[in-house]
């Protein structure tokens, strides 16, 4: 069975940082820098997902607006119609979705509410940890059973 977004979410810090559509870009940049996050979901006044601001969006805003960027808000720079995921979606499918949409972050939706965000880094870390556990289990199996012919 393939791992799901829920398993990835359980293995990481679950604090979710969000911003509203009218949040100034300077505040978004500060939030992302202080919390070492690469993206933040943008919510409307009803707490519904309306977009996502990523590091890429901040750089594009700076390139397009120069020093006037400080006057922009999330609404003006966010990516709209962002792909999302659910807790039960398999991480291999999530990785394919990220590749297809060229997105490194996907908001996680549960009952029409944003409950988290998963990044490509989260998936890579989860898969590396999973591979290390598998290697360790295989080594234990070989060395602690009659199947080992080396070193005996």
Image: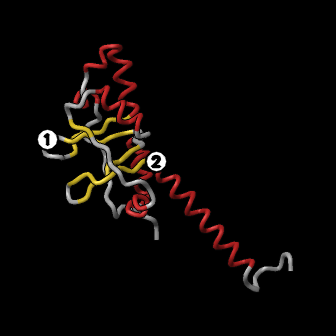
Task: Determine whether 68 is above or below 91 in the image.
Answer: above
Which residue is more in the foreground, 134 or 80?
A: 134
Task: Determine whether 11 is above or below 36 in the image.
Answer: below
Specify the farthest residue to the front.
Answer: 34
Residue 79 point in image, percent of width and height = 29, 35
The residue tagged 2 is: 120
Identity of the residue drawn at 41% across and 62% down: 10
The residue tagged 1 is: 45
Q: What secondary structure is found at the residue carrying circle 2?
A: helix
Q: Quadrant of the C terminus?
A: bottom right
**Quadrant of residue 88 within the rendered picture:** bottom left
Q: Is residue 66 left or right of residue 147?
A: left
Q: Is residue 138 left or right of residue 72?
A: right
Residue 43 point in image, percent of width and height = 21, 42
Q: What secondary structure is found at the residue carrying circle 1?
A: loop
- In three-dimensional space, the C-alpha distance between marks 1 and 2, rounded to whole angstroms, equals 28 Å
């Amino acid at each position: 069975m393939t791992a799901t977004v829920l398993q990835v979410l359980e293995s990481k810090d679950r604090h979710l940082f969000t911003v509203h559509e009218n949040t100034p870009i300077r505040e978004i940049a500060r939030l992302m820098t202080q919390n070492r996050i690469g993206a933040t979901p943008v919510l409307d006044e009803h707490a519904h997902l309306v977009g996502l601001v990523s590091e890429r969006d901040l750089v594009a805003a700076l390139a397009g607006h120069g020093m006037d960027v400080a006057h922009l808000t999330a609404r003006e720079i966010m990516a709209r119609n962002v792909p999302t995921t659910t807790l039960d979606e398999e991480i291999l499918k999530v990785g394919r979705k990220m590749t297809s949409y060229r997105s490194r972050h996907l908001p996680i939706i549960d009952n029409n509410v944003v409950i988290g965000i998963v990044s490509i880094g989260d998936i890579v870390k989860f898969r590396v940890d999973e591979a290390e556990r598998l290697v360790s289990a295989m080594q234990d199996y070989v060395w602690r059973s009659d199947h080992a012919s080396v070193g005996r």
